[in-house]
Amino acid sequence: MSSLINVPTTRAASSPGAVAGSPTDEVLRRSHLVGGNPTLTRAGGGNFSAKGVVGDVPVLWMSSWGCDGTATTAEDFPALRLDDLLELRHAVPLDGPAMVERIAATALTADQRPPGIETLTHAFLPAAHVDHCHPDAVISLTCIPDGRERAAAEFGDEAIWFDYRQFDMGVAQELADRVAAQPGCRFVLLANHGIFTWADTSDQCYRNSLEAVARARRALGAAARGRPGDLGGSAVRPLVAGQADDLLDELLPVLRGAMREDRRGIVLSTDTSPEAVRFVSSVRGPELTQAGPGCPDSLVTVGYRPLALTPTDLTAQGVRAAIERYRSAYVAMFERHADAAARRHGPRRDLPRVVLLPGLGVVAGGADPAQAAICAEHFAQTRSVIEAADAAGGYRSLTERQGIADEYWPLMRLKPLLRTAPGRLAGSVVLVAGATEATGGVVADLHAAGANVALAGGGDEPSRPDVVHLRARLSAPEAVVREAVRAFGGFDVLVDLTGVDDRLLQAAAAVFARQGTPGIFCTAGPTGGRVYDGEHVDVLVEEDPSMVAERIIVATTEPPQGSTEDAS
């Protein structure tokens, strides 16, 4: 059956791994090019494939499920027996789980990573190299009311327009049929989703994706001619720098406390760029976000829609009330549209992942900095798509019914994108203060347990997303706390290795109060067993710094007891 496909004769020796100059080497390089180009796809989006042979076996190397193109390795391209996949080309369509199981059964070796759910489309398209990605420009073109007509005028018979559907075996078969019936076709435009491109060489496949973006931009430009691209202008005047900083310092811990589920932690990423502030302060921007996401990937991270606050919501009480309204609205949407399978499990998460603060910017949440950053990136894509589509005639996205169907689609929920390592302090944020001989060990132990660390006064090592070295000096405790809040949205634990200054604890206690749950104050080393008798803080005293992480793990996994002192 592989005669249906132009399989290159380049061989990958007898191994399914990458070989220099082989199809695997080419697709690995191409995935890095596509994944590193934000005009083609956003973080974690898209998938890539190449066809060739291993020994005498025709093979499809398909990118693994949820991998990020910028960081793929040879192990991210499992080898699948192409003839076995092509047996499904005209078969009776299987349901989602059966399709995934059948694809997995084509693996050349048993220890490979699972391939993406678009595998069959890659297999059925008649070219050696195939890419699927999510360009903002193409999504924007497919979101405007006359997008189909604009696309037809720009692409003609070189593109197929495909209305939005969940990817399954039937979609793969229909796309293959339509491409076969349209010999000049070089692109598939997936409405509200992205594109497929293909070619017999890796370089041409990449060039085809770039061409699709350029032509989509040209079509959008023609549609936008003479239209203002300002989302209706400004509805809210952005706050000046000092006022904005003070208000964010006040609201970020409130948001962090209200956005986390049960006792699980959350990390916040804050975007106060001029572009983000302009969007959240515009007349139509926040309203259009309620029409659905720019790309289905957002359903895994952002959800169907963000929480758009109003200026009157920008108080601690207003934020908490708005989040409760969001939760009620989400449950009502779930009740309106969830199918029987989704109802058996109930709503998975009714809390917002992204919050728009007019005049201030955008806040995104995740279980760790990487997840929060990708959530922010996915909303940035929605923002970009809305801006382009609004200027070109209007923005239309997935309906509520489509959004719930995809959010609770088992294959979407199984996507291994953004899975967090199960550290016992995952999602927690710890502010460690002090430069002592014990500091490095304490930070290493906390990090090994999955905590995110804000370090004040210790070490000159460069920061990384989950360990941030604060610039503020310990002699300015209010500045230390503000910088920690800005880095992660707040923190759950203060580890004091200095033993000299209660002003830092007083400042931290105010953050704990705004978060709405007791924080932990842990003194470590011979600190004199200081006693704190205020609210919102559980106190631990640990003379052995090597036990700090373990003591915090125990304290955070026990039921909260309110304000206590532990002098053991």
Image (cartoon, rainbow, N blue to C red):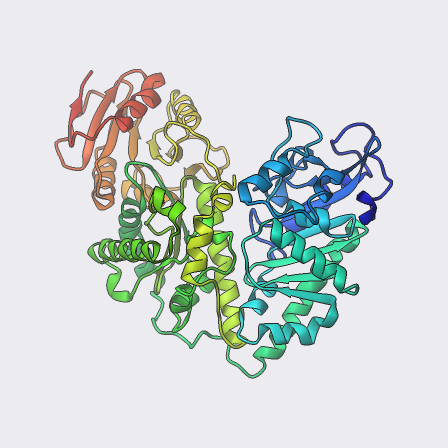
> Would you place residue 28 above or below residue 158 in this image?
above
Nearer the observer, 281 or 13: 13
Q: Is residue 172 visible?
A: yes
* Residue 444 falls left or right of residue 261: right
Quadrant of res 529: top left
Q: Quadrant of the C terminus?
A: top left
Report the residue at 80% width, 43% height from top: 2
- Locate residue 156, reporting x and y percent: 72, 72
* Residue 53 falls left or right of residue 91: right
Q: Is residue 33 visible?
A: no
In the current view of this chain or complex, which residue is farthest to the right?
9
In the current view of this chain or complex, which residue is farthest to the bottom?
226
Report the residue at 44% width, 25% height from top: 448
In the current view of this chain or complex, which residue is farthest to the left?
533
Quadrant of res 399: bottom left
Quadrant of res 433: top left
- Locate residue 270, reporting x and y percent: 40, 52
Nearer the observer, 178 or 307: 178
- Locate residue 159, reporting x and y percent: 70, 66
> Would you place residue 329 above or below residue 33 in this image?
below
